[in-house]
């Protein structure tokens, strides 16, 4: 298992947090996705054999948010 943390820009409410969390959990190999509105962060634990950091970034961006 690997763990990575991203800064996520553009989240303004709890629905945004839910959207980012949902997008990350849909990536094959993601085990845990913790998203914080106040810290503008997403912490992800994932299987590096199934998913890459680029997959995770793409999921966040596809949900409409910026990865800084």
Image (tube, rainbow, N blue to C red):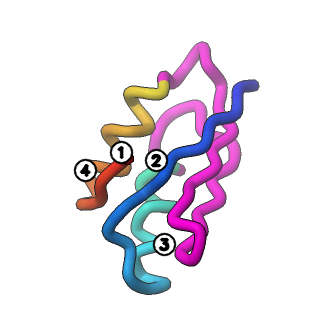
Local crowd size for mark 4, using a 10 Å CA cut-off: few (<14), some (14–19), many (≥20):
few
Q: What is the spatial separation of the Cα atoms under label 3 and label 4, in whole angstroms? A: 14 Å
Q: Left of 20 or right of it: where is 46?
A: right
Query: Which is more N-terminal, label 4 or label 3?
Result: 3
Q: Name the residue under label 4.
A: 62
Query: Which is more N-terminal, label 1 or label 3?
Result: 3
> Which span of residues is magenta-colored?
25-52
Q: Mark 3 points at which residue?
A: 17
Q: Nearer the viewer, mark 3 or mark 2?
A: 3
Residue 59 numbered mark, or none: 1
Q: Which of marks 2 and 4 is in front?
A: 4
Residue drawn at 71 percent across, 26 percent down? 2
Q: Left of 33 or right of it: where is 53?
A: left
Q: Does the magenta stretch include residue 32?
A: yes
Residue 45: x and y in percent read 69, 39
Contact check, label 2 and label 4, Cβ < 8 Å: no
Contact check, label 4 and label 1, Cβ < 8 Å: yes
- Does residue 3 sit above or below 25 in this rendering? above
Residue 26 numbered mark, or none: 2
């Amino acid at each position: 298992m690997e763990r990575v943390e991203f800064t996520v820009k553009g989240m303004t409410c709890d629905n945004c947090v839910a959207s980012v969390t949902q997008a990350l959990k849909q990536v094959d190999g993601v085990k845990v996705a913790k998203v914080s509105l106040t810290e503008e962060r997403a912490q992800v634990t994932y299987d590096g054999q199934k998913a890459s950091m680029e997959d995770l970034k793409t999921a966040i961006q596809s949900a409409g948010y910026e990865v800084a």
